[in-house]
Amino acid sequence: MADLTARAEIIRKQAEKAVARHTKQADETATPYTSTEGKPLMGLQRYPEFKPLVDEIVRAVLTKINADARKIESEMPYKAQFTLEEVIRELETRV
């Protein structure tokens, strides 16, 4: 039994060293595509060059919705919000 305990301790130490080595390698090879927490960057955080285009499209869509949704005769009290939600749903189905 003492032999097994000694072997288990050796294996535990080897595992600790392997984990430390792997962690160090992971830190050294971190890419600019990960956050400081190690999570992958998504969307505009990863591809900031698209931000001007996205901002332009957002402004155009919101301007169009605000200008035209209020002109629609409906009992809907939140016409602009409803329109935006439907645009989002439609875009999600097309992506």
Image (cartoon, helix red, strand yellow):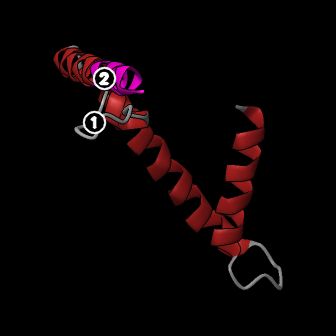
Looking at the picture, tell me which residue is in the foreground, 31 or 91. Answer: 31
Q: CA distance from mark 1 to mark 2?
A: 41 Å
Q: Is residue 30 left or right of residue 91?
A: left
- Identify which residue, 83 or 85, lies in the foreground: 85
* Residue at 74% from the left image edge and 57% from the top image edge: 86
Left or right placement of residue 71 versus residue 57 in this view: right
51 in magenta: no
Quarter of image, res 21: top left
- Taking the spot 78% from the left edge, 39% from the top edge, the residue there is 93
Which residue is the site of mark 1? 35
Look at label 1 and name its amino acid. Answer: Ser
Q: Is residue 31 at all visible to an observer of this figure?
A: no
Q: Quadrant of the C terminus?
A: top right
Q: Position of residue 64 (x, y in %)?
A: 58, 56
Q: Position of residue 55 (x, y in %)?
A: 39, 44
Q: Image quadrant for the N terminus?
A: top left
Question: Measured from the top left, where is residue 66 in percent x and y?
Answer: 57, 67
Look at mark 2 in the image and give the residue it sits on. 6
The secondary structure making up most of the magenta span is helix
Magenta highlight range: 1-12
Q: Position of residue 91 (x, y in %)?
A: 70, 42
Q: Residues within 10 Å of mark 1 (few under 14, many from 20)?
A: some
